[in-house]
Amino acid sequence: MAHPAPSDTIAAIATAPGESAIAIVRLSGPDTYPLADRLFRAPPPLPSARPAGTFFRGQVIHPETSETLDDALMLLFRAPHSYTGEESVEIHCHGGSQPAQRVLEALLVAGARQAEPGEFTKRAFLNDKLDLTQAEAVLDLIHARSERAARLATAQLENALGHEIRTLYETLLALCADIEAMLDFPDDELPQSVPKELSERMSPIETGIQALLDTWHEGHLLREGARIVIAGAPNVGKSTLLNLLAGRPRAIVSPHPGTTRDTIEEFITLNGYPMHLIDTAGLRDAPGDIEQEGIRRAHQALSQADLTLCLVDASQPISQAELAFIFSHDPQKRIVLGTKADLGVVADPQQLPPLDYFPVSLIIDAPLAQIKAKIIDKVLGECPRSDHSDIAISGRHRKSLLIALDEFIMAKKRLNSGSEADFLPAALHSRAALDQLGHILGLNISDAMLDAVFSRFCVGK
Ligand SMILES: Nc1nc2c(ncn2[C@@H]2O[C@H](COP(=O)(O)OP(=O)(O)OP(=O)(O)O)[C@@H](O)[C@H]2O)c(=O)[nH]1
Ligand SMILES: [Mg+2]
C-alpha cells in the first residue's frame, strides 16, 4: 500500500510544557521556507537563501500585526537531510508557557497546520528515513523509564531489530519466489526432491522467528514495567516493605491493623527493569465500608499483578485463609515472605515448597538485596539473562510474528505432503508469512495500522 507524500506544512511545539530555559517550535513541509522568510526577521540573507545547518538569531514577527513575538534562534534543515526528510526549521525561543505558544499560533495564522501526535516521525517513516521498528524506537526512547529500557530503544533505533527482520524477510522473499516457480512447472517435470528441499530451507527462518518471539517477555517488561502487588493480612508489614523497596517513607506505617486503606503505587527500577509496586489494604473480613472498598481495590490490583508478594507474619501461626490466599497464586507469580522473623519464627507453612517461603525481618537488618534479587528472578522468569539486550520485541511485533509462524507451519506442512495440489496453498501461506514480516517493518501496511502506531506519540515528535 503506497502512502501519498504529505503536501501540507506542519508545526508544533517539540518541548515539554512548563518553565524552562528554551522551547522549540518545529516546522516541516513544502512551505517551510516561505513561512520562515515571512515570520523571522534577521539580517540578510533570508532563511531560504542560507545553507542547511545554519543557526542564527532574529525576531519572530506576527504575520498580520507585525508584533515582535520573541527574540529567538532559527536552525535550518534541507530535504532530504532532515528528521522528516522534508524542508524543515526549528525555532528555539524562550521557555515558559507563552513564547512558544505565540510563535506556534503565528505559524498557524500564516498557513501551517498544527501537527498531529507523532506526525514528524510519521513523515520520516513515509520518506524512508526510518523503518517502522525505528519509528517505534523513537517512542520507546521517549517513554523509557530505566537505563536498560533506553539502551534497548537506542539499539532498535540503530536498526538492530529492523536488520534482523529484514534479513528474515529477504530470505523468505527468495523462498516464496522459488515456491511460486514450482507452480509453473508442467505436471510431471518437477523433480520430486524440490518441495522437500524448499521445506528444509524454511527451518532457519522458523528458528529465527521463534528466537525473536522468545524476546517478547523482556521487551514487555522493559516497555510496560512489571506490576508487583504487596498483599496479605492487616499489620503484616506490607507498607514497611513498600517503603523499604522505594527507599523512602511513601506509605504510613503503624502498629494499628487496617492502616492502609487505598492502594498506594510507587515506581522503582530493579536491575534496569521498571516496576510498579502496589501496596494494598490488609485482607480480612472488614468491619467498615472504607476498609471494604480498600479490600475491593486490593483484589482489583491483584487481578492485574505480574507478581504478588504474599506477606504473612512469621511470628504468628499462619491461618487457613492466608494459606488459601497463597495457594490461589501460581508459584511462578508469587513470593511468600514471612515478616517479623526478629520476633521468632512460628509460622511454618509446611505445605509450601521449602524454597518458596522466606522468613525475614523488615526492621532489623532487612535483607533488601536478597528480596530484590528474588523479585527480579521471578519477574524475569524464563527470560534469557543478558546484561545488554539489543533486541526485545513489542506486542505489535509479537502479533505479526505469531501469525507469520502459523502461516509458515501451514506452508511447511503443505510442502512436506509432496502432493501437487498442495503447492498453491503452500505458496499462499508463505506469502502471508512474508506479509506479516513486512508489516513489522512497515511495508504494505494499512493507514489504520500506521495511525495506531503514531497516535501513541506526543505532539511535536
Ligand atoms: N518486629 C517487626 N515489626 C515489623 C516488621 N515489619 C513491620 N513491622 C511493624 O509492624 C507494624 C505494621 O506494619 P505495616 O507496614 O504498617 O503493616 P501493613 O501490613 O501495611 O498493615 P496494614 O496497612 O494495616 O494492613 C508496624 O508497627 C511495623 O513497624 C518486622 O519485620 N519486624
Ligand atoms: Mg499498610
Image: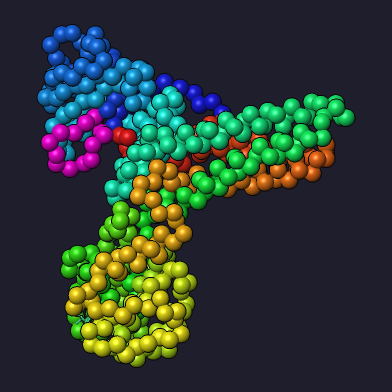
The answer to whether residue 40 is left or right of residue 389 is left
The colour scheme used to paint the residues is: rainbow
* Residue 269 position in % (x across, y down): 28, 57
* Residue 295 in sight in this render: no
Residue at the spot x=47%, y=33% of the render?
163
Residue at the spot x=30%, y=84% of the render?
313
Corner quadrant of residue 363: bottom left
Residue at the spot x=24%, y=18% of the render?
53
Q: Nearer the viewer, residue 390 or 238?
A: 390
The answer to whether residue 300 is left or right of residue 427 is left
Q: Quadrant of the N terminus?
A: top right
Q: Quadrant of the C terminus?
A: top left
The answer to whether residue 353 is left or right of residue 279 is right
Corner quadrant of residue 323: bottom left
Q: Nearer the viewer, residue 206 or 326?
A: 206
Decide whether the magenta segment is chiefly helix, strand or loop.
loop
Decide whether residue 182 is among the magenta residues.
Answer: no
Magenta extent: 13-25
* Residue 92 position in % (x across, y down): 18, 28
Corner quadrant of residue 37: top left
Q: Nearer the viewer, residue 267 or 126?
A: 267
Decide whether residue 22 is among the magenta residues.
Answer: yes
* Residue 14 position in % (x across, y down): 26, 34
